[in-house]
Image: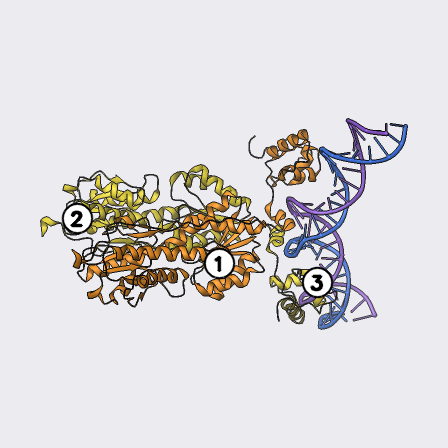
Chain colours: A yellow, B orange, C purple, D blue
Amino acid sequence: MSADSDERGASADAEARVPVLADVAQLAGVSQQTVSRVVRGSPSVARRTRERVEAAIAEVGYRPNVVARTLVTKRSHRIGVVAANASLYGAAMTLQGIQEAARATGYSVSLVMLPELTTVSVQEALEELRAQYVDGAIAVVPEDGAQDAVRAVDAAFPCVLAPGLDGAGVADAYWAEVAAARAATDHLLDLGHRTVHHVAGPSDWAESRARATGWRTALVERMRVVPRPVRGDWSAASGHAATLGLPLQEVTALFVANDAMAVGALSALAGKGMHVPDDVSVVGFDDVPEAAYYAPPLTTVHQDFAEIGRRCVRVLLGRLHDRVVEAGTSTPGLVVRASTAAPPLLR
Amino acid sequence: MSADSDERGASADAEARVPVLADVAQLAGVSQQTVSRVVRGSPSVARRTRERVEAAIAEVGYRPNVVARTLVTKRSHRIGVVAANASLYGAAMTLQGIQEAARATGYSVSLVMLPELTTVSVQEALEELRAQYVDGAIAVVPEDGAQDAVRAVDAAFPCVLAPGLDGAGVADAYWAEVAAARAATDHLLDLGHRTVHHVAGPSDWAESRARATGWRTALVERMRVVPRPVRGDWSAASGHAATLGLPLQEVTALFVANDAMAVGALSALAGKGMHVPDDVSVVGFDDVPEAAYYAPPLTTVHQDFAEIGRRCVRVLLGRLHDRVVEAGTSTPGLVVRASTAAPPLLR
DNA sequence: GTGCTCATTGTTAGCGTTGCCAATCGGCAC
DNA sequence: GTGCCGATTGGCAACGCTAACAATGAGCAC
């Protein structure tokens, strides 16, 4: 029972060595191959033999050497993840979802976090992962150049892109986000705002574009003026700065592309003496856990990032095993809180 | 130059196979061993031979198989990381620091994220990592039971605990945090508050205890009343709830154990019609990037989590190579913003 | 009894690398 | 010429496992 007692066993030359297949085989009086079969759960082992082997395994405390196994089978049961900045709530949660799903399926995760996403850096990261003999990779790299890199490598080495949907699926996720942004904008319009201003994310992120597209579509559809959006880099600081670049005297509603920037926007507005939601309504995107506690509680679009991560894993493993996977889409939904209200004119 | 052109090379039986040492050796007309030496940068290879081999490597596009190498050398050049919830800003940034430092040193990172930290779950995670043949592990698990688990495994398998300091160093990090909490409390006291209330984190986190200890020490040292602290779980929601459990009519200063809970506290206070900092001063801990944009901008203690992560890597790699590493301590420092002011009585 | 099948088990070769030791060779002191 | 040295290079045997095939033996129809 206890750790490595090795008084028994035929040749007790043991020096607290890590037990290998051969040790178990010898103790159980069978061939290595039989032990290997037991370990892998092969059906063609007689029950009595299996039991004997299992006892021996337990006795010596044998654990298979995954490195040797990988060398032979060419399957590491590990997946790689390329991610950007973990300080982004979405990325961090997606990573968590990936982890969770991978672990649940018996896969482990190798991580490469990139300080900046460029075609080159992502490509390098993927090559690095590949050199690590991971079976496939997930790239949580919503930036355009990065996505090109992924697609370039994909042929030789299975990669799935972060929204987690193959082929047409990517589009689904994109459109789901567009729809959510549109719903957010519609919500503001429904409250009576004439139009809605927009603080967008970096222009080379698909998310930014989806959210901006949804916003624009909502406005156009109702034939409203489409103001020129300002742009941030997802950070609160950039949201603050971008908001100050808006013609604030005429802004009554603001759709911000993520919650962190929305915090910056709230702060900028407060700095200008404008009250939210009395003077200006603000809607964010992501629904970070703090969103309900901001001042005021932020109306925002909820996203299930962990589910996105899990979905990526399903798709990737499906690909690895030549299975077609029904990925399913998780639709982001608007959460209305206290940062939105009717415009001042209508009060 | 281009990818895998294989018209040349003696036996062109090539089927787009991944090139191995033997292929390079044959092409260069040397033994595998010599190629291996070149690959590993051994000095005992004649210059001309090395050049020939390097050319052959480039020609066939050879890349060493790390799995085979690991099998022989018993070194994977990979480290494991066990972390908790990535939605915690500190954990996410620490992870990023780890990643960065590891990658810079030629190590890759395997990640296990745990939904909950318990002695058992952490122990399992470490065993899992070990079974993956990582060379060592870093545990970003500030919870007590988890830390016991790490220490238990450590003897057999090098692990460093998240604050990233071996032995006495752990204490250093702890005391640095105590000192910072104390400085935060002193700051409030200096402003004229009679005493300071405290919203603490989970009781089994070392961080919680350090911050509470610093707070208590500051109060005791100046012979102030030490109010009963309330407790949250690091989340904004819990900070909100905990704050409401305080005798708010007598609170003028509040030290909250992290920024997320401070957001909750701010929200709770606002809900009670209390103004910050006019009626109550609030200090947080961590200095998340949004802290400067909260309403009001939050006075908090800045921590360099990425540096903590990097330090962990230095310590671990030092241990792996039997080097003693001067880890150095990064001292957290108070950042005064607009959430603190003199108490109302003194105005 | 013979020949067949099925279930189980064993044997033999690798997988792609590195560690260890031996071999080769030019140069140099004697 | 002989012997020895250091610098290079090569050969061979692992590392711990699995794939493929061979071997064994029991059970059964004839």
Q: Give how far across and how far down residue C17 sits, in percent.
A: 65, 44
Q: Which chain is home to disc 1?
A: A
Give the foreground label among 1 and 3: 3
Between discs 2 and 1, the one toward the N terminus: 1
Between discs 1 and 3, the one toward the N terminus: 3
C-alpha separation, residue under disc 1 versus residue under disc 3: 34 Å
Few, some or many residues within 10 Å of mark 2 (<14, 14–19, 20+): many
C-alpha separation, residue under disc 2 versus residue under disc 1: 45 Å
Give the residue pinned by disc 1.
A103
Q: Give how far across and how far down residue C15 sits, in percent.
A: 65, 47
Which amino acid type is marked by label 2? Val
Give the residue pinned by disc 2.
A280
In this rendering, position of residue A65 left or right of residue A208: right
Give the foreground label among 3 and 2: 3
Which amino acid type is marked by label 1? Arg
In this rendering, position of residue B293 left or right of residue B322: left
Confirm whether residue A95 shows in the render: yes
User: Label 3 near label 1: C-beta < 8 Å?
Assistant: no
Between discs 3 and 2, the one toward the N terminus: 3
> Which quarter of the image is occupied by the N terminus of chain A?
bottom right
Give the residue pinned by disc 3.
A14
Which type of secondary structure does the marked residue at label 3 adopt?
Answer: loop
Q: Give how far across and how far down residue C2 sits, in percent.
A: 81, 66
**Res B154 → quadrant:** bottom right
Q: Nearer the viewer, residue B209 or A7?
A: B209
Q: Nearer the viewer, residue B282 or A303?
A: B282
Q: Give how far across and how far down residue C14 sits, in percent.
A: 69, 48
Q: Nearer the viewer, residue C10 or A172?
A: C10
Which type of secondary structure does the marked residue at label 2 adopt?
Answer: loop
Which amino acid type is marked by label 3? Ala
